Image: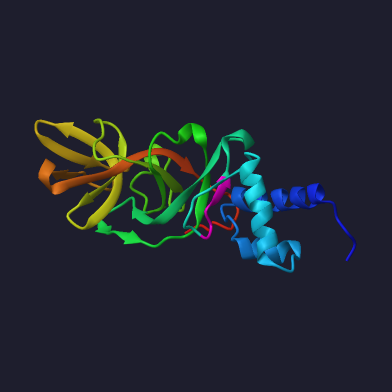
Amino acid sequence: MAYTPQGKTRERVWRFVRERILAGHPPTVREVQHAMGFRAVETARRHLENLVAEGKLRREPGRARGYSLAEETGGVILVPILGRVQAGPLTTAIEDPDGYLPVSMERNKGELFALRVKGESMVGAGILPGDIAIVRRQPTAESGDIVVAMVEDEATLKRLIVRQGHMELRAENPAYPPITVSPHELTILGKVIEIRRYLESTSLGAI
């Protein structure tokens, strides 16, 4: 095999890793090794460590897919897609990790996670079945916020309305009645801060 200068090889590694991260699937070290045709996994690891040292990548220790883009490369972080949430009648919460979603660092004002939306109760707010809700994890929210909340062991995505000591989870679809609960019956998991929609099938999939 012809000799390739280290700088050009590292640039190839960088382009491959960046493309995979932006697609929501950060590669493992072995995947980099196979994609680049390196004989030894340590060669791939060395290139990745150098990219971290150069400030192009960040690495989270202890995770096989722990590489993310550093702020200097466009300020992108990867948010885990934890499962599905019902925008409709209450349904048992489902946690089914399913990849990662690239999100701007500007949105990273706390711990974020993402959920795929099922149901049509929030169509009036522009939230459709198959959308992906990006959620900031927080235990409280203001009246009028769109939240992901648990009532006992069931999760739903609704607009929170607080009135006279009671909380109402209100749909944005007249076909769905509001859910009224007392504060001790409700656990707020987070506030919805962004909705993603894909018009064609992607590696993230749609439901």
Residue 168 visible to an observer of this rendering: yes
Q: Residue at x 23, y 42 (%)?
A: 169
Residue 176: percent from left, percent from top: 26, 48
Q: Is residue 206 left or right of residue 177?
A: right
Query: Closest to the observer: 107 or 126?
Result: 107
Q: Is residue 15 left or right of residue 117?
A: right
Q: Is residue 109 left or right of residue 67?
A: left
What segment carries the magenta color? Answer: 64-68
Query: Closest to the observer: 113 or 198?
Result: 113
Q: Residue at x 69, y 53 (%)?
A: 47
Instruction: Check if residue 83 falls in the magenta segment.
Output: no
Q: Main secondary structure of the magenta part?
A: loop
Q: Is residue 196 positioned above or below 37 on the image?
A: above
Residue 172 visible to an observer of this rendering: no
Residue 170: percent from left, percent from top: 25, 40
Residue 173: percent from left, percent from top: 32, 43
Q: Residue at x 38, y 42 (%)?
A: 111
Q: Is residue 58 left or right of residue 162?
A: right
- Residue ranking furthest to the right: 2
Query: Closest to the observer: 20 or 57?
Result: 57
Q: Residue at x 29, y 59 (%)?
A: 93
In the figure, residue 202 lies in which quadrant? bottom right
Residue 89: percent from left, percent from top: 26, 54
Colouring used for the render: rainbow
